[in-house]
Image: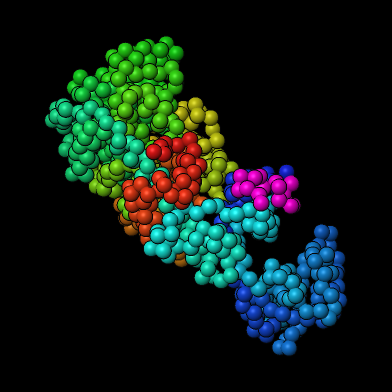
Amino acid sequence: MARLTDPISMLRGIGPAKAKLFEQLNIRTLGDLLCHFPRGYQDRTKMVTVSQLQADEPACFRATVMNTPRTAHIRKGLDLTRVQVADHSARLTLTFFNRKFTADQLQYGKEYVFYGALSGDFSGYQMTNPVFESPDAPPGATRRILPVYPLTAGLTNGVVQKAVAQALALCDPPEEILPERIRQQYGILPAETAYRAIHDPQSMEEAEQAKRRMVFEEFFVFSAGLAMMRSARTSVQRMPYENTNLRPLLDALPFTLTSAQMRAVEEIRSDLCGGTVMNRLVQGDVGSGKTMVAAAAAWLAVQNGDQAALMAPTEILAEQHYATLSKLLTPLGVRTALLTGSLKTGEKRELRRRLAAGQIDFAVGTHALVTDATDFSRLGLVITDEQHRFGVAQRAALAKKGRDVHTLVMSATPIPRTLAMLMYGDLDVSILDELPPGRQAVDTFLVGESYRPRINAFIRKQAAEGHQCFVVCPAVEENEELDLRSAAAWAETLQKTVFPDLRVMLLHGQMKAGEKERIMGAFSRGEGDVLVATTVIEVGVDVPNATLMVIEDADRFGLSQLHQLRGRVGRGDSKSYCILVSHNRNPETLARLKALCATSDGFQIAEEDLKMRGPGDFFGSRQSGLPAFRAADLGFGLQTMKEAQEASVRWIDSREYVQSREGQALLKRIAALFAGGEATMN
């Protein structure tokens, strides 16, 4: 027997070239291959007669070849082969394009099972390039439930299917990690049955049961890992903070915190006084005031003799945070400093000396905070903003610069509340679900290409009034196949043809970091009228003077991402607008985009996104460095995930896993899933 850790190159037909194609799908071993689940299925079990075939509806039928296939050379690169088949009910012409070898396998007078779809009009129907096989052969391309796999260019479904069949024949599926009691309670298939059934189901019902097992299993492992991480964290004892007086800070604010902000602050204060290490997520919509919550946490840390550090993903965002926080905290005696990579060598050296000497209480910065050259005297609190932009290793590296460091992570990506509790099982979650008074609502409109003259006129009007505009494109460069508006080409068109008298700037993710910082900084200072960009501006960009956001090919973005982009405007005193441009007339797409126009509540939008797209898309935004999900988007909703979480947490809390065979297998899976992450197995 082969092992799950063996490379897929051991399989017949998988040479170095094909192995590289599989690697593009993150498939390197037999185990990876067996966990490459179908994205759907074609039910080819139902047989019909030729006369029962319907246009554009693929189906299986048995028919006899009525003549020898004939091939005609139409033009260079195009051969056309025709053959007639028939059963007792009707006759049908089959057409094969550039498949003479395939068609020649059909022998006059013999019967075959075919699968394909009719095409044509009232003048006559035909079938193009059907698959076929002998009725005496085992079901392969016909008479079965056929799995349809996620693919990459150069890799066909048939190649993946044959590789999976070989892997199933050569090695046992992954071992069982779910106790029989839990499987029976939730109606979950055993591992061996499920792994075989998901790749070769005997019915659509069996395929659904296998998919449910995979979703349940994946979240069982994930949630068990998070439960262990939480248990390890809460077992660490730490001296509780005693000085928790927030009154000097609150009195210094030029506004009153919202009830949601105060609730989050109180939750943080409770954590810091609890005698264990805090690990809390503050999740809030765009403009909900997370920075002030971070200020309160930093204030408490400093008042209790600790240093605090806030790490932001870009220099611009770090500078914005520093400007806000130093203005508030410095008059209160908190020594603040900004540490970024672009500072001069001498300035960085001096700042690091003061940090190590304890002469700085609160450091705001970028990745420069986590380099080996940066040391702290008594680091006690680490705050990371836009946390999904940082890997686990980066957060851990900063936390290791102190001892038993409290961690506060902030995210402006709205996630449905129920889903947040699943995704952040290792963290305590605070949600800011209301906006501060005076925050501008952004009027949002959905228009087609016919509105282009009016859009351009509106951009010019905003510029004439001294305001700035973002134009977001889904692609960096032209792509004829996808027919997407590209940032580079559109910026050139706007500057040369549409707005030659305005200052049009370009920003995209393929630029070097320094160039991106330079352009964004210049736009923030008002040195440009229109910034054409990709989604690189999705988070961490604060230009209060920007009042208009135009999003090209808006149907190419998820609702939550569109909401994040919209949040780049409406940050100042002037009325702001968002225009979604799309020529997609699909009713579901239009309904999705209209949902964004109808509300500015990011959590409500996230709920709509969850209903329309399923939970799979949200897991990429959890945090880089933690595991990718293979089964999350197989089509099962939150109920299965919640059941898996409940079951795993109960099992971990009971510590039954310590002595059981399934428990030992589970520990291996958790260790592999969180490789390089934070999971502690104890």
In the picture provided, is 63 more to the left or to the right than 567?
right
Magenta region's main secondary structure?
Answer: loop
Observer-nearest of 428 and 121: 428
User: Which residue lies at the image location 73% right of the left edge and 76% below the top edge?
Assistant: 135
Image coordinates for residue 137, horizontal then vertical, percent: 74, 71
Q: Residue at x 80, y 66 (%)?
A: 102
Identity of the residue drawn at 29% across and 37% down: 234
- The foreground one among 472 and 389 is 389
Vertically, is 292 above or below 182?
A: above
Q: Considering depth in this image, is 119 or 307 the residue closer to the camera?
A: 307
User: Visible in this render: residue 127?
Assistant: no
Q: Is residue 83 above or below residue 515?
A: below
Q: Residue at x 36, y 12 (%)?
A: 353
Q: Quadrant of the C terminus?
A: top left
**Magenta segment, which residues?**
1-15
Say if residue 62 shows up in the picture: yes
Residue 521: where, in percent of width, then height? 42, 29
| Closer to us: 25 or 117 | 25
Is 594 placed left or right of 428 in the picture? Answer: right
Hey, which quadrant is residue 264 in on the image?
top left
Residue extending farthest bottom: 88
Relative to 440, 57 lies left or right: right
Q: Relative to residue 16, is residue 334 depicted above or below?
A: above
Query: Is-magenta flag for residue 217?
Result: no
Residue 347: image x %, image y %?
39, 13
Image x and y of residue 641, in percent: 40, 56
Q: Report the coloring of the rendering.
A: rainbow
The total of numbered circles placed on residues is 0
